[in-house]
Image: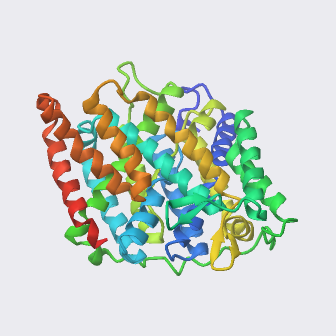
Amino acid sequence: MNFFKLKEHNTSVKTEAIGGVTTFMTMAYIIFFQPMILSQAGMDFGAVMMATIISSVIAILIMGLYANYPIALAPGMGENFFFAFTIIIGMGVVWEKALGIVFISGILFVILTLFKVRESIVNTVPESLKKSIAAGIGIFITFIGLQWAGVIEDSPGTLVTLGSLNTNYTLLFFIGLIIIFFLYARKIKGAILWGILITAIVGIPMGIVKFGGIVSKPPSLAPTFFKLDILGAFHWEYIVPILVLFLLDFFDTVGTLIGVSSHANLLDEKGNLPRAGRALMADAIGTVAGSLFGTSTVTSYIESATGVSEGGRTGLSNIFTSACFLLAIFFYPLVKAIGGGYQVGNSTFYPVTAPALVLVGALMIKSVANIKWDDVTEAIPAFLVLIGIPLTYNISHGMALGFVSYPIMKLFSGRVKEVHPIMWVLAVVFAGSLVLSTRY
């Protein structure tokens, strides 16, 4: 095990194994969520599950073997909603072409990582906008979770209103919400995963979860494998989605790398992350692989901090995490029962997984605390992003409101020198996306 430098990091195979399995337990919910979310956009549930697992394993192994870090990767929460609800459902792009957009953004990630350009681009985006994007997506995810639970529904007069709370599926949602909040508050490892599983068990006697077994042969990958339309994605109107995917992934990855590495004491004396380029390359290649197999952008997971808390310090942890992901391909009946949804007339509800979306949203909203609310030139653009994402039901449109207003606010306040030239370019691009939004 000299390859992973276990002695240098004061760890052991047993400790790394515990860390790797713990990380898997805390992020395994993506195996349920990803096919559930992308199937809303017309993609095959089983194939997306397989694509999610395979692309995650590839990225996790690259991070472990190439960068030697205990940081796991999988399709990102936020990026998957943008892929399904903004690009496919909102813009009307067929999912094959949407995968092509992900592929192009992945290739862009690789190129910019090789030339070390990614760091310089992200440093030009104000911290207030970065924090508001995360929080806005959190509200958006919670909003969708409440919709999927039937707690809120559409209304002709007020757009949305309170749904019927006397149904068995809304009852299961609230039961699940209590369970998952309790587990998380008690700091139970894998609280989200255990919450989903326990809620599913409760849903069986209620007739909501149709249990069809636990283990079976893996589903076919054929419905999505190499079905991406790369040439169709080469169109000027997809510049904004590609840019948004780049920004979302980069913010997620850099934030996670710094946060987890700091927690694990892996930063050098200057506070920098050694082998940062290799770590960034893991999510870039993972994204490209994901688009080829049939899933959305792959990124680093903050849940890796749980494995680090259990002692994981090297890439060996990732070997165990990837092994757990591979085993999951044989549990398709369980994944389908939990993530398949509950049909009521022409509507489908997801009371088993919706509570987890509410929790994820609650965790993401905390970033608003770091926004400079006493500075109007920072606060107003951040606020527009915060409310724009859920109220337009579109992540890129919400981001556009902030990116366009930010340089304008600085200009009006006589502080235009604080705006980096790249921010003006981004403002023009996002402004163009808003003008053309009626086409979507």
Q: Position of residue 248 (x, y in %)?
A: 38, 49
Left or right position of 159 against 415:
right
Q: Is residue 201 above or below residue 136?
A: below
Left or right position of 437 against 334:
left
Q: Residue furthest right?
A: 205
Q: Position of residue 50 (x, y in %)?
A: 58, 69
The quadrant of the rendering that contains the N terminus is top right
The quadrant of the rendering that contains the C terminus is bottom left
Determine which quarter of the picture holds residue 254.
Answer: top left
Q: Residue furthest front?
A: 157
Q: Nearer the viewer, residue 161 or 283?
A: 161
Q: Is residue 225 above or below residue 289?
A: below
Would you say residue 150 is visible in this rendering?
yes
Residue found 67% across the figure and 57% down from its top:
353
Residue found 71% across the figure and 43% down from its top:
191
Determine which quarter of the picture holds residue 12.
Answer: top right
Left or right position of 407 against 319:
left
Q: Position of residue 213 (x, y in %)?
A: 81, 71
